[in-house]
Image (cartoon, rainbow, N blue to C red):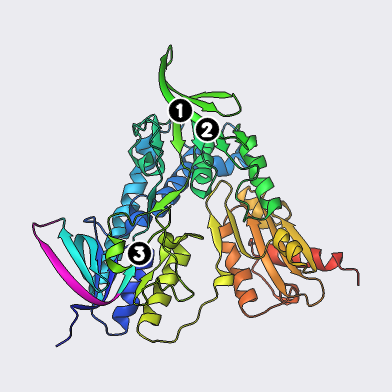
Amino acid sequence: MSAYDYDLLVIGSGPAGHKAAIQAAKLGKKVGVIERKTAVGGVCINTGTIPSKTLREAALRLSGYRDRDLYGASYTVKQHITMADLLFRVEQVIQNEIDVSRHQLMRNDVDILAAHASFVDAHTLRMDYVDSPGKQELRAENVVIAVGTTTTRDPNIPFDGEHIFLSDDVLHLKQLPRTLAVIGGGVIGLEYACIFAALGVRITLIDKYPNLLPFVDREIMDALVYHLRSSRATLRLGETVKGMELADDELGKRVRIHLDSGKEISSEQALYSIGRTGATRELNLPGAGLEADARGRLKVNEHYQTAVPHIYAVGDVIGFPALASTSMEQGRMAACHAFGVPSHSLPELFPFGIYTVPGISMVGKTEEQLTELGVPYEVGRASYKEIARGQILGDHTGLLKLIFHYETRKVLGVHIIGREAAELVHIGQAVMAFGGTVDYFIDAVFNFPTLAECYKTAAFDGINRLAR
């Protein structure tokens, strides 16, 4: 008889926990997933990635934003767009993804336990069930912590979920505002700022740093900032918020935001998005000999092991890059390592997809990183407006940047802004994974007309810049 109830218990059913559980189950292990809500999928499916990306797609379709270069600035599919219009499609997608995720766990014989979990000791978890009365203690040989994050709150701000709200509250808004202030220019804040700007909402974006998303190539970020300002957004960069309050005036309730610089911003609503905190507060980490940092995050090694070797942590709870795609891979790698199964990954080639309007995607090094490292490089560029598919789509502002080594011509990075950026980047990712050079794109033949032709155009542009 085993001393353990499970070979692996996974706390959290988001992308990281989901993949860790299924990988262990594929290895013939007895696996349980503990989810504190009755619906699986975590933040990714229920309030984060899937809802926000579906909301973005609905906004772009209904507003006619993508076709305005073809039909004019006044073009719209629906003149008066409501939150109900936007959320109609969101709810459908959420329910489908929950069902798919649950079915995948069930057909791999993973036990789904709806409970709040907390450590009794390093191998024992206390279960407080949410769908039935009672408590239970379960022992596991290995544990994966994949609890994700929660929105960070400032106790001095009067959140009401309607006028001053967090990103998790967006799905519960009753109507679109005419003006919206977004506090925090991280990925989440920037994505929502772009979505609402595409819908015609007057946006004011406030961030304490002078440059948005410093890990993104500067040229690409400058292009996004230009697009935001073209959509009548106001950017207050290098500014910090001193305080916020709800006030009544002749137009009804308004949010007043006071900046440390002395400026005051008035808006119908305000989205507070200054980061996320690891959802570890209720886990009783000291019971397992663990400790989280000030933001609730756990420190791990290259195998995603915490300070207690048989306890792993994966996904957003370990911090950057906090993407669904990277979280899935971390979960798979952790499960393989826990059971001594060799596995291989390429973290240096993890792609980034940022669903702003227009979208951004990248893989590999930026110009700024290569300059700091002293690596000689050259850049090739291709504008969507010179690609037939770009003209057909009506995207005249998209750009693909191809960065390659000046001497070896090896591809070092791909950076894209424009339609289908998150799809297009995978071509460059594949070439980089096999150590390919810029010459591959010269010799390759791409379907016509496609956006993939950007790679060939950018390659010719880059090679023409070489001195020899």
Q: CA distance from mark 3 to mark 1?
A: 33 Å
Viewport quadrant of the C terminus: bottom right
The amino acid beneath tag 3 is Ala
The amino acid beneath tag 1 is Met
Stretch in magenta = 131-142
Please report the residue visible at 23 percent of the width from the left and 61 percent of the height from the top. Answer: 117
Within 10 angstroms of label 2, few (less than 14), some, or many (20 or more) residues? some
The residue labelled by disc 1 is 244
Secondary structure of the residue carrying tag 3 is loop
Secondary structure of the residue carrying tag 1 is strand
Q: CA distance from mark 3 to mark 2?
A: 32 Å
The amino acid beneath tag 2 is Val
Q: CA distance from mark 2 to mark 1?
A: 8 Å
Within 10 angstroms of label 3, few (less than 14), some, or many (20 or more) residues? many
Secondary structure of the residue carrying tag 2 is strand
N-term-proximal mark, 3 vs 2: 3
Q: Main secondary structure of the magenta part?
A: strand
Foreground: disc 3 or disc 2: 2
Q: Are marks 2 and 1 in contact (CB under 8 Å)?
A: yes
Q: On residue 241, which mark appears?
A: 2
Residue 171 in the image: state x and y as whole percent. 35, 41
Q: On residue 146, which mark appears?
A: 3
Q: Are marks 3 and 1 in contact (CB under 8 Å)?
A: no
N-term-proximal mark, 3 vs 1: 3
Q: Are marks 3 and 2 in contact (CB under 8 Å)?
A: no
Q: Is residue 138 magenta?
A: yes
Height in image: 288 above or below 67? below
Front-most of 141 and 211?
A: 141
